Amino acid sequence: MAASYFLVLLLFLSLGPHRALSAAGASPYLYPATFFKNYERMLTSFKIFIYTPNNPIAFTAPPASLFYDSLLRSRFVTADADEAHLFFVPFSPDASTRSLARLVRELRGNFPYWNRTLGADHFFVHPTGFDFTADRNVLELKKNSVQISVFPTTSGYFIPHKDVTLPPVSPRALTLPHAPPGEEPPSFLGYLRWDGETESVMVNELKLDDEFAVESQPSDDLGGGGGVQSSKFCLFLYGADVAWLPAAMASGCVPVIIVDRPIQDLPLMDVLRWSEMAILVGSTRGAAGLKELLRGVKEEDYERMRGLCVAAAQHFLWNAEAKPYDAFHMLIYQLWLRRHTIRYARREM
Ligand SMILES: *[C@@H]1O[C@H](CO)[C@@H](O)[C@H](O)[C@H]1NC(C)=O
């Protein structure tokens, strides 16, 4: 009797925390129980060693330039390579394969750090990402080191689980007022800012459907347009105009990403619960299929997604001076998650 009571208690105790976690399913984080603690540990412990570049480095466009400048000024940089968790290899985005090969050869020969992991505890910034090459040195950099590129990154230029993407810089302010729930229902099911160029059968269908607002030649100003505020879902053609994705999320317009292949380069992919915040859909079923899918989203599910989008949007915000939990710090956090590499000591005989 006592034993079975004990068993039940044990069962309850062991189920308890898991239940609490799934009840907190309304968290935008994949690991809500450890995220904040781990972030704080990162602030106090994380150390990055930066190799001195051969030439002056020019990242001309944000977000790569913002990330680079913030990193150089940050508390994470150390001059003592022996205490570093990760090593940053700076080079200009237009560096040729040849000069990259030379760079890696120099790191390999002049420092003891590359050989310990063959570059796995190294990272670099390359706005578009680059392809596999035949050069052994550059291939090692590509395959082993963490690549930081801008979202979205060409398929094949991005290696899932290893590489990370920088959230795009939003053209305008991230905080747009969205009608609070219960007030006027949104006038449109979906809103699409179309660049006017990307050819798409689906866009042509959407333009003819009055449940969708398609704005071609949109201005950078989201506030006046009203499409975001008056629509339930914000549609994105993957690869075309994604810069305002964070702005849409901040204003509570649930993103629908239209893409015909699996994508694994979403920003903060290993921190945020994207599956609860965005809908990924192929274009083959056309506007009618999309409409059916979006209409089928239950109201309570929609409200939860909307809340998570708003909660997560702060993490996509770029600041000239980095602020806690902003895009810069979240990038650093993803690097922090990648610090556990095995370093092989070179056997001296
Ligand atoms: C790293 O290994 C290569 C051989 O793979 C060797 O030529 C080079 O000298 C090593 N680097 C250091 C710093 O020992």
Image (cartoon, helix red, strand yellow):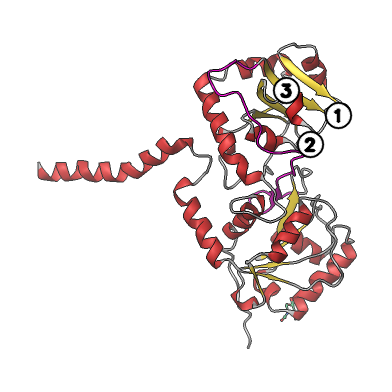
* Crowd class of label 3 (few under 14; some 14 to 19; many from 20; radius 10 Å): many
Displayed quadrant of residue 266 = top right
Label 1 secondary element: loop
Alpha-carbon span between mark 2 and mark 1: 9 Å
In the rendered structure, which disc, 3 or 1, sits on the residue that comes first in sequence? 1
Percent across and percent down for residue 22 are 42, 37
Displayed quadrant of residue 313 = top right
Q: Determine whether 328 is above or below 219 in the image.
A: below
Q: Determine whether 323 is above or below 213 in the image.
A: below
Residue lying farthest bottom? Answer: 349
Q: Is label 3 in contact with label 1 (beta carbons under 8 Å)?
A: no
Amino acid type, residue under disc 3 in the picture = Gly
Q: Determine whether 152 is above or below 141 in the image.
A: above
Q: Is label 3 in contact with label 2 (beta carbons under 8 Å)?
A: no
Amino acid type, residue under disc 2 in the picture = Gly
Any mark on residue 239, and which? 2
Q: Which residue is located at x 70 percent, y 72 percent?
A: 114
Q: Is label 2 in contact with label 1 (beta carbons under 8 Å)?
A: yes
In the rendered structure, which disc, 2 or 1, sits on the residue that comes first in sequence? 1
**Region in magenta:** 158-186
Q: Is residue 171 magenta?
A: yes
* Crowd class of label 2 (few under 14; some 14 to 19; many from 20; radius 10 Å): some
Any mark on residue 198, and which? 1
Any mark on residue 26, and which? none
Q: Main secondary structure of the magenta part?
A: loop
Alpha-carbon span between mark 3 and mark 2: 20 Å
Q: Which residue is located at x 54 percent, y 32 percent?
A: 307
Mark 3 highlights which residue?
Answer: 227
Mark 1, ligand 1, within 8 Å: the answer is: no
Question: How many numbered tags mark residues here?
Answer: 3
Q: Which residue is located at x 67 percent, y 48 percent?
A: 160
Alpha-carbon span between mark 3 and mark 1: 20 Å
